[in-house]
Each structure stands twice: as structure tokens, then as C-alpha cells.
Amino acid sequence: MKRIKKNGFTLIELLVVIAIVSLLSSIVMASLNSARAKARDAKRMEDLHQIQLALEMYYHDFGKYPEIPDTTAIPKGIVTSYHIDPNDSEYRDYLSWSILGDALINNGYISELPVDPINRDTDKPGESNSSLVYWNTTSYIYMYSNLDDVYGGDSDQTYDLIARLETDHPNRCEEKSWKVHSLNPAGRSIFPNMVWCSGGYTISAKYIYADH
């Protein structure tokens, strides 16, 4: 009696194929996630550049940078892109990114104030008296700091505008040592050598990016 040979895969062959497909999928997903992170970082740097241009036009016309009012919730003179909707139940007393927008948009220097692609704040600004602490963990927000006259001098003549990158971009603070400007107003040098990724802060601070 002649035996009929059946065509098909054995169980082992199927398992090998599944394993290979899974491995390739993992590689593709990792590459895709890396590309997305790089794209978000590129947007962050472009966003800050656009805001910087608007700030310089504002300064040209008014002779100072936008001043941020005081608040009991977070340090004087700081706004972040997180919680931009004052009707949000999580808004609390945080200063909204739209406050900076009022100065730049209403005067025609920028059509819309951008926000971080992730726009997530895990450090809760209202729980600390230091702007630097925002960057100790995994916050992805934009921050504008203009400390008014807290430290004396003409602090409306300088500002800080920062974001946090996700990748080892050459423009990260670890490579560039971005200076903290708000704590060194004109006529006063309170912390002349302080940088955003200075000692005492967690490793995530090395990913901070500043516009100047």
C-alpha cells in the first residue's frame, strides 16, 4: 500500500517561524519608537526656537521680556505648558502656559503657543519652591521662567525657556551645560555658574534643552 506524503509544517517549524516573526517585530517596534522620540525632540527644539523669536520681537518693542505674575502655588515668575486649560479639574493654582501666550499672541508675535508633544508633568510644580525640581523625574513640559524682582536687579531683561529631550541629542544639557539665566538678573549674579544639569539633580536633568 502506497503512503501519501502530507505537505505542511511540523510543530517545531511553526514555533521557529513564530519566534523569528516576533523577533523581527520587536526590532521594528524599537526602531519605530526611537524614530518617534527623535521626531518629538526635533519638534521641541523647533518650538522653543519659534518662542525665542517671538520673545525677541516682544523685547524689541517693549524693552523687556514678558513678566509673569506672582502666585502662591509655584515660584514667582514661572509658567509651564502643562495644565493649559484653567477649567481643567487638575489645574489647581498652577500658572498656565496661556499667560505667556497672552503676551506673545495678543501682540501678534506668534499665532499659537506650542506645547510639548507629550506635555506630562509628574513633578507637580505646586509641591516645590524650586523650578529645577520639575526636571528631576520624567516631566515633559515646556517652562518659561522670568523671576521678576525676586533676586533684585532688572530680571525682566532675561529669561529661561527650557524643555526636556528624550534622546541623547548633542544639544542636551549634559553636552551643552545650559546656563540658568533667571537666577542671575542684570546687576546681580546670584548663581553665576549654575546650569540646568548641575550636581544634586537626578540623571534625567542631563536631557534638558534650553533655547539659549
Image: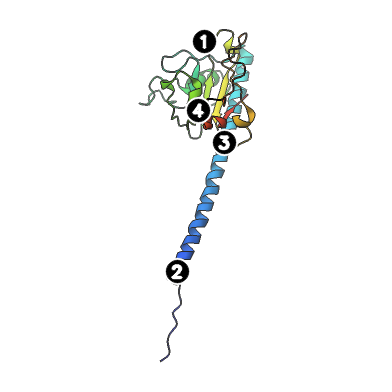
For label 4, count other residues whose C-alpha is less than 10 Å away and answer few (under 14), some (14-19) or many (20+): many
Viewport quadrant of the C terminus: top right
Image height check: is 211 above or below 30? above
- Label located before the other in sequence (1 or 2): 2
Q: Secondary structure beneath disc 4?
A: helix
Determine the residue located farthest toward the front in the rendered image. 200
- Label located before the other in sequence (2 or 4): 2
- Label located before the other in sequence (4 or 3): 3
- The residue that disc 4 covers is 135
For label 3, count other residues whose C-alpha is less than 10 Å away and answer few (under 14), some (14-19) or many (20+): many
Residue 140, image x, y percentages: 49, 31
Kindly report the distance in space between the C-alpha atoms of the residues bearing marks 4 and 3.
16 Å
Q: Which amino acid does label 4 sit on?
A: Trp
Q: What residue type is labelled 1?
A: Val
Residue 94, image x, y percentages: 42, 21
- Label located before the other in sequence (4 or 1): 4
- The residue that disc 3 covers is 41
Which one is nearer the viewer's eye here, 29 or 91? 29
- Label located before the other in sequence (3 or 1): 3
- The residue that disc 1 covers is 150
Q: Residue at x 51, y 20 (%)?
A: 100
- The residue that disc 2 covers is 12
